[in-house]
Amino acid sequence: MKKKINSDFPDLSWRRYLVPPVHKEGLKILGVVLTISIAFGFISAWFGLLFGPFCVFSFYFFRNPERVVPTGENLILAPADGIVCKIEEVDTPKAFKMKDKKLTRVSIFMSVFNVHVNRAPVSGKVTALNYHPGKFVSVAEKDSEDNERQEILLTTDNKVQLAFTQIAGLVARRIYCPLKVGDDLKAGQVFGMIRFGSRLDVYLPKKVKPEVLVGQTMVAGETVIAKLGEE
């Protein structure tokens, strides 16, 4: 008799850890790497094997593991995996012309070992987008206006505005963000990614204090970085 599987029980098998889903943008790059590996394999088996590690790395880098989004309407979730590298008061993105000119910014740094898929920090409607093409600026200069960046403004059902920014480093044009003004997002929903090590900034609304510390590890779509309405 076939054993009935409890669908409410989470997947704890090895597949969850070793064979996670891959983001569709990663599939394109993985396909190119595999094609090159096979092509070189026809020339020499050794050449083909040399590209094996690149295939494994590409699969690992563009993974899109499942995340369990916490319940609660007032939660601001981490939009990226990584380490909190800065928490500071800064000028708000000029393009959005927000009422508050100074806001607390929580910056999350993503290394090449982190998941690079980005998730919405709150539920809301995309009310503004501002893309900067960027130049070849080093990773150390991510606060520079010369970095490639995609600024996003979400407005919740309660009319709270939350701005966040995808930032790329030395190699420009690595940001993937297919959002359009008017799109609706759910908290924890995948909205884009940044190819290779980069940063993602969240501008907390006025009087909202961060509940994370510099050096803390973030899990996109799961870690609560702040709560709306709490001072």
Image: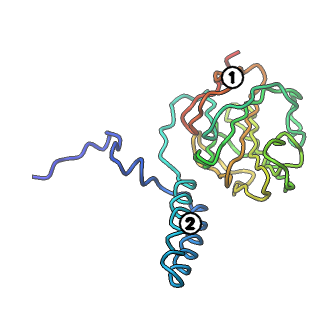
The residue shown at (56%, 60%) is 58
Circle 1: residue type: Pro
State the colouring used for the structure image: rainbow
Q: Look at the numbered disc 2 and give the secondary structure of its residue.
A: helix
- What's the residue type where badge 2 is placed? Leu
Dividing the picture into quarters, in which one does residue 10 lie?
top left
Comparing 35 with 10, the one in front is: 35
Q: Position of residue 14 (x, y in %)?
A: 35, 48
Eye-nearest disc, 2 or 1: 2
150 or 145: which is nearer to us?
A: 145
Residue highlighted by disc 2 = 30
Q: Quadrant of the C terminus?
A: top right
What kind of element bears circle 1?
loop
Q: How far across and down, in percent of the image, does residue 230 sit?
A: 67, 17
- Res 47 label: none
Where residue 205 appears, as percent x and y from the top left, is 76, 27
Above or below residue 44? Residue 114 is above
Residue 137 left/right relative to 213 = right
Estimate the x, y position of residue 103 in percent, counting from the top left.
Answer: 82, 27
Q: Please say if 203 is above or below 25.
A: above
Residue assigned mark 1: 210
